[in-house]
Each structure stands twice: as C-alpha cells, then as structure tokens.
Image (cartoon, helix red, strand yellow):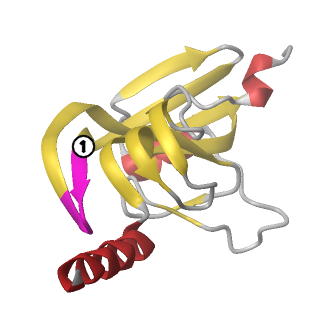
Amino acid sequence: MKIYNVLLIIFLTFYTLNCFFGVGRIAHKEYVKHSFEITDKKNSFEWPKDFRNPPSYTKEDIIDKWGEPSKTGIYNNCNYIAYRDGFTWNIIGAVIFILPVPILIFPTGFDEKKIYFIDGKSFVYSQNSLQDTHFFGYFCGDRDCKLQFGKTYRYSENEAKLLKCIGPK
C-alpha cells in the first residue's frame, strides 16, 4: 500500500509541474509587428525609439541598408520584400513524465523576414515564430485542463492576416 501512495505522490508532483502528457507538434507561424526600426545588421529589427511616430521606409532605403532581397512579391494590395534567414523547422515530440522527448525534427522551408509596403511606404514586418499547432493528449496551461486531440486553439494559417492589405487601395 505504501508503494502506491508514493507512486501517487510522484505522479501528482509531475502532474503539477508539467500539465501535459501526450504528443505535440510545434511549427512556425508568421508573427506580424506594426512598429519597427531596421538596424545596420541585416535581418534585424528593433523597437522604434519614438514609438508614437515610428519611422517609415521605402524599398530603396531598406535595399541600400541590407542589400538585395531574396524575394519580392505582392500580397493583395501590398508589395513586400523578403530576406531569408535560415530554415523553418517542425518539431514533433512526446512528454514522458516531465521530460520532453523529440521524436522528429525536420526543415519545412526558409525562415523569411518580410517587410510590407502600401503606396511605397513600409507599415509592418513579419517573421516566423515557433508555436504549438497540434496536441494529442491531456494538458493544462492558460486554458482549462482537458483532453485535446487535433489543432490547438492558437493554430492559424502561416500567412498572418494583414488587414490593410485586404481592404481597397
């Protein structure tokens, strides 16, 4: 009987520390930021010094500072330039007690930093960030504790919604 009590205490300790038991997938999602300044270091952004009046750049300003972009394109009513900065990765892993165990790690494309323009002026940039996209198991967190099978509530398509680009020009 003592051994069962010890095992129960150990299980409850792991449960309160971890709150996730199962298999999950972590993948990239496009994160959009509206105010930014570019730096002299290529592919690097920083918070604007004057956040009330953030600077606006033209394509030429950015190309002069960072060089030729890896890709240019059009997204609805907006133009964008993109600079590659490595690869994007997907991670599939399991959690056994409190230890995360990666099962599969694989590249899924290029990590790109994009700057979007309307009427020749920059207004947002985007970059990829890793987020949980699918869970199969039991988990807690900022949500209620529950069994989860499939997409997480934060899952969305990799293209973020750029509202100014969707509206009329």
Where does label 1 land, which residue?
91
Q: Quadrant of residue 104?
A: top left
**Is 153 placed above or below 65 here?**
above
Front residue of this view, candidates 35 and 92: 92
Specify whether 30 is left or right of 108. right
Residue at x-position 38% and y-position 75%: 12
Front residue of this view, candidates 121 and 169: 169
Specify whether 77 is left or right of 69. right
Q: Secondary structure at mark 1?
A: strand
Residue 149 visible somewhere in the drawing: yes
The extreme front residue here reads 1
Where, quadrant-wise, is the C terminus in this rendering? top right
Q: Quadrant of residue 71?
A: top left
Residue at x-position 77% and y-position 68%: 51
Neighbour tally class for label 1: few under 14, some 14-19, many 20 plus, Cα within 10 Å: some
Residue 130 visible somewhere in the drawing: no
Residue at x-position 62% and y-position 68%: 47
Say how many tags the image has.
1
**Is 9 placed above or below 120 here?**
below
Highlighted range, magenta: 93-100
Where, quadrant-wise, is the N terminus in this rendering? bottom left
User: In the image, residue 153 lies at what x, y percent?
Assistant: 59, 38
**Is 143 placed above or below 153 here?**
below
